[in-house]
Amino acid sequence: MPAGSGTYHHGDLRRTLLAAAVEMIAEHGPAQVSLRDLARRAGVSHAAPTHHFKDKTGLFTAIATEGYQLLSDSLTGADPSDLRNMGRRYVAFALAHPAHFTVMFDRSLVRNDDPELAAATSHAGSLLRAAVTDVPPGRRGPDADMAELAAWSLAHGFATLALNGNLDHPLAHRNKSDYFYALTELLFA
Amino acid sequence: MPAGSGTYHHGDLRRTLLAAAVEMIAEHGPAQVSLRDLARRAGVSHAAPTHHFKDKTGLFTAIATEGYQLLSDSLTGADPSDLRNMGRRYVAFALAHPAHFTVMFDRSLVRNDDPELAAATSHAGSLLRAAVTDVPPGRRGPDADMAELAAWSLAHGFATLALNGNLDHPLAHRNKSDYFYALTELLFA
DNA sequence: TGTACATCAGTGAACGCGCGTTCACTGATGTAC
DNA sequence: TGTACATCAGTGAACGCGCGTTCACTGATGTAC
């Protein structure tokens, strides 16, 4: 970590910019983010972000990639045969990283053919898929694809509704990912 | 229907603008919509939309309101005790009206305290809620709120993933709302 | 049927603004010898 | 330890653009008498 404050070179500007962008997205949504405003927040000249991300799409692509890596981190280490727990972790990830989650699932924001993004996406995807295929066939029905989609839909829908503020009134005082865990018991018991 | 073509007064400009905006949202997302571009598409002067919607937020608020009305229309007439069918209709609505659905669930786009929007929202909400409470307690577990949220999450998640293009590869050739109907059987049987 | 008047719908010019992008530049760092 | 040089990171001025919004206006419609 070479840089102190006040130097010409920032030292870790890329990380600083990503963090600032994530904050801005969480507050006002991706549409309100501008590269100039981002630079202002980070205290650098307005041309600096271009240096790191090329353009706005590049910025969002980097955030989405980071998001899939964070999701993979969240899922790694869990018992892959415990599908309910995987679902809870998925929901917890979305609530902990709302800005990443939003960008990850808005294809109009990112460079969809970016190789790093594709790699991060497929790695997280394989972790999720493994969780479903590890469930004994008798408990998930005959169709594994359908079971996978059902589980994913349930977790994704819950997370999306929570982030959109549609669960605020009924669930304001609860831990939402634990509530989700309880909810899955209702369905799978 | 007073107006022909070429007249100074358009006749039904509000509807025309709403339709054009919906088309633009479906193609490029809400962030890309500008009032000037919208006016261009409708073939009117760029100041005309302001006359009908006041500003951009007003436009999105009108679209969200219309969306909730369309959703209510889609749900009306269904057997309120057939929760699975209600879910299928919810998914079918989202797929048939992707732009409306997107705007309805993005609170950063609309005037949340708009009374017409609130009325349309709560009407659709009560139709959905009725479907869950009509399910016999034995089949939905002890907690009606939780059952409601589970059903909503499942349908909402499936619809969201479909609209984001996350189901394109596995389900490209299928009727998605029928697939969803089959999926719910797996969970509720 | 005819005229006067109020209301409504859409026009087009003008404004100021923040934006993305480009460019030649300069300060700082790291490496070779 | 010292010097020269290449590379990298960030600067700041400049550009052209499309945007939202305001405004006095004009054309069309509807209503009262």
Image (cartoon, coloured by chain):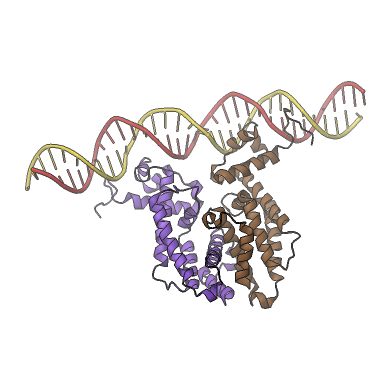
Chain colours: A brown, B purple, C yellow, D red
Question: B45 or B51, which lies in front?
Answer: B51
Q: Where does the image place residue A101, in percent across and percent down from the top left?
A: 62, 53
Relative vertical location of residue B52 with respect to residue A170 in this rendering, above or below: above
- Residue D22 is drawn in which quadrant? top left
**Quadrant in which the N terminus of chain B appears:** bottom left
Residue at the image position 66 percent from the left and 42 percent from the top: A19
Q: Where does the image place residue D28, in percent across and percent down from the top left?
A: 22, 45
Q: Is residue B16 left or right of residue B189?
A: left
**Quadrant in which the C terminus of chain B appears:** bottom right
The answer, for residue A112, to whether it is visible in the render is no
Question: B26 or A6, which lies in front?
Answer: A6
Relative vertical location of residue A20 with respect to residue A185 in this rendering, above or below: above
Residue at the image position 61 percent from the left and 61 percent from the top: A179
Question: A115 or B64, which lies in front?
Answer: B64
Residue at the image position 56 percent from the left and 46 percent from the top: A30
Q: Where does the image place residue A78, in percent across and percent down from the top left?
A: 74, 62
- Residue A120 is drawn in which quadrant? bottom right
Q: How many marks?
A: 0
Q: Where does the image place residue A158, in percent across and percent down from the top left?
A: 58, 60
The answer, for residue A131, to whether it is visible in the render is yes
Question: B12 or B85, which lies in front?
Answer: B85
Q: Is residue A34 left or right of residue B103?
A: right
